[in-house]
Amino acid sequence: MTKLDVASERKAQIVQATVECISKYGYNNFSMQDVANAAGVSKGIIHYYFLNKDDLLKSVLDKVAEDIEKAIVSETKKAKNPREKLEMFIEVGLNVVRKNKEYYQVNMDFWTQINQNTDIRAVIGRHYAKFRETASQILAEGVKDGSFKDVNLIGYASIIIAVMDGISLQWLFDDSVFSYEKIIEKTKNLILSGLTPHNVSASGSP
Amino acid sequence: MTKLDVASERKAQIVQATVECISKYGYNNFSMQDVANAAGVSKGIIHYYFLNKDDLLKSVLDKVAEDIEKAIVSETKKAKNPREKLEMFIEVGLNVVRKNKEYYQVNMDFWTQINQNTDIRAVIGRHYAKFRETASQILAEGVKDGSFKDVNLIGYASIIIAVMDGISLQWLFDDSVFSYEKIIEKTKNLILSGLTPHNVSASGSP
Amino acid sequence: MTKLDVASERKAQIVQATVECISKYGYNNFSMQDVANAAGVSKGIIHYYFLNKDDLLKSVLDKVAEDIEKAIVSETKKAKNPREKLEMFIEVGLNVVRKNKEYYQVNMDFWTQINQNTDIRAVIGRHYAKFRETASQILAEGVKDGSFKDVNLIGYASIIIAVMDGISLQWLFDDSVFSYEKIIEKTKNLILSGLTPHNVSASGSP
Amino acid sequence: MTKLDVASERKAQIVQATVECISKYGYNNFSMQDVANAAGVSKGIIHYYFLNKDDLLKSVLDKVAEDIEKAIVSETKKAKNPREKLEMFIEVGLNVVRKNKEYYQVNMDFWTQINQNTDIRAVIGRHYAKFRETASQILAEGVKDGSFKDVNLIGYASIIIAVMDGISLQWLFDDSVFSYEKIIEKTKNLILSGLTPHNVSASGSP
DNA sequence: CATGAATGAGATTTCATTCAT
DNA sequence: GATGAATGAAATCTCATTCAT
């Protein structure tokens, strides 16, 4: 293992420990000592690999955002047509939250930095941009092959992601309000109905 | 001015100052001294009126959540039929965020307490419950008078609020992605199209 | 009731409340607010009747020390001869502690002020002086009528009080070490044996 | 110097500084800053070695109680027979207070925690238990070899310690009441007279 | 006399960061 | 690279005391 490998592995180890700490103690309630304990390293070494706590947090955000995105993209690829891809996108996106509740919450914790930390704000902004890009590519594909109505790509992508975020949020605060399975279906239906070409729906009426 | 008035006025004054501080310094970066300075009172008096920082924050959340809710409800009442009411609900809800960016962000800052503070979690949960209730009453009205399709009320209400929250969120991170006016229209259209009774849409094609 | 009566009664009420607070929260853990609550008066009025917290505490000490002394003296008077008086003195003195555990502890709390507060030190010193005086008068009576050996009065009085204090102390820390009844007897025996005239003990052998 | 040495030395240094502070400012009037200043370290390091102020105080009590005990035990060992040992025990015990007035007062300051801090109460209780044990062993020796009367060991040990504590106490409040030398003699005489076997005293009269 | 709102000093405690080893 | 002792700034919270009403 090269020196570079050791370094990046150590960094990953510390970042992972930080995720655990945020989840356990809260975004503003964990100390560098907590991270050191969780990672099984000394407090000093964290400052060797990371400039300061802010720098460490930025690395955490990078990892968390990237992980969530990867999970969705990899699953989406398996589908064969735009309609299925979009359904996958919604389903996986919502299930990621359900299955990684804590992880998603850590991601959410960074939202409070919106006003104070422009770096973090930018990272989150880019993350959403990528996310919208993924969705809009699926939409573009469907528009091209005629299975979707010709909507404004970025606009509709924004709305798709909005529903997913919003539903996750409400569920995190109270998971007894709706059935997760059913709300996924309802979301899919609404999103797809908004994409159905007129003639297609009209085709139903002779 | 009676003593009771002094007390409630002073409390309101401190809560207001806290909102400003959260907005200015960040949810986790403001001190009791900051609040005291902003309110023009001594540090001690804050602890005289509020048990501790957590207690103060809970009062802030109460106020912020209530204010947002009131704004939406009062505007919605002006509309005359369910369809218009729903459009108002969406429009006002989204505009509240745009016009009170900082205020809405303060509200959002509380989301991070989801894991750590069960009290706050409960307050937010109740706030969303009320919010869904407002939306579902509008839906019920429309279903009753036949202008809306017979949807699952709480489920559809959840989705309406989800889009609004999600759109606000993306906009807060990057307001250059979409036109706020246009996205409001798109949201309204999607939500309403999901409520249009089948025969009504069919009636469009002779 | 005259103004003076009202004042002294109010003072007594506050002092009594303070005793309760010291007993409940500890000598250094009670606040003026605690006293106000316990006395059912406002915080302000305490400062009307007492210069400050120290002044209030001095009044508390006066009362506590005096009460303990009074209890012992009044009981002692009932006995008819020096020997019985001394037995009473010891018995009552030790029982006062047992029956007024908390009260005696409040008295003890003042001992820590020995280095810092010369006023309090002086009050305690005077209290012990009076206490020794009471004991030495009993001794003097017995020496005079020949029932006691001719001991140094203040010295022996000091030792009598010392045993009583020391026994109380050990009992307060662990009341399972000795039987209170038996230790009272043993103390009496030792003290009295030290006072028995030689010829009296010699008289046992003809 | 190893790290372990540094740690235990630093702890000892801080405990010693605390003893000085308690003696100088009073049990309830010294701050962590005072201790830091006295020890010549930063405030932070005290909390690195001790959990909190209470924990530090417990360490102080441990040291003070232990030191007093050690002083007495080591001196007592030098005597050759039970009678001399007991005289030593009393003499050294009383002189420890006189020669380490401040130190003994610090020990006494902990007595006020009897109601509030069960930990400290237990430590003091154990300290007295050990102390009684030491005295009762000397008594047992004397009873065995016939130089002492057959008394209840723990009971008589309690009384011996009681006189010593009580005398110290009165002297701390007013050192002009009796001559320390003479009171030591009187105490010894009383304690020993209570232990003299009957036949021995009878042997004095032919 | 009586109240309790208001002050502000000061106490404990936490913790990011540094640096000698 | 790695450790953990040490620092010191800053934060929360308490509370005796004052004073307008």
Image (cartoon, coloured by chain):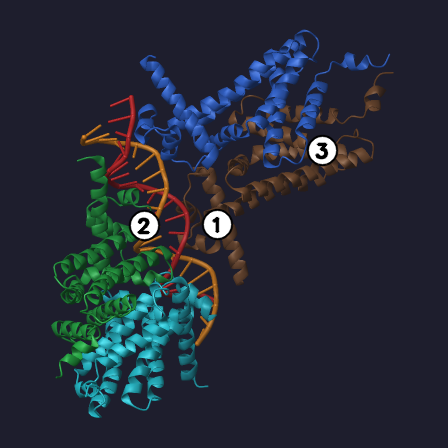
Chain colours: A cyan, B green, C blue, D brown, E red, F orange
Per the image, the residue denoted by label 1 is D14
Dot 3 or dot 1: first in sequence order is 1
**C113 and B3: which is toward the camera:** B3
Position above or below: D178 against A65: above
The amino acid type found where label 1 is placed reads: Ile
Q: Look at the image and tell me in which quarter the N terminus of chain C lies.
A: top left
Q: Position of residue A114 (x, y in %)?
A: 24, 67
Between marks 3 and 1, how big is the CA–CA gap?
36 Å
- Residue B135 in sight from this viewpoint: yes
Q: Secondary structure at mark 1?
A: helix
Q: Secondary structure at mark 2?
A: helix
A98 displayed left or right of D188: left
| Residue A65 picture quarter | bottom left
Residue found at x 85% / y 14%: C205
Residue found at x 80% / y 33%: D143
The amino acid type found where label 2 is placed reads: Asp
Q: Secondary structure at mark 3?
A: helix
Mark 1 belongs to which subunit? D
C18 displayed left or right of B76: right
**D80 and D190: which is toward the camera:** D190
| Pointers 1 and 2 in contact (C-beta within 8 Å) | no
Per the image, the residue denoted by label 3 is D86
Q: Position of residue A77 (x, y in %)?
A: 33, 88
Q: Position of residue D20 (x, y in %)?
A: 47, 42
Between marks 1 and 2, how big is the CA–CA gap?
37 Å
Q: Pointer 3: residues within 10 angstroms few (<14), some, or many (20+)?
A: many
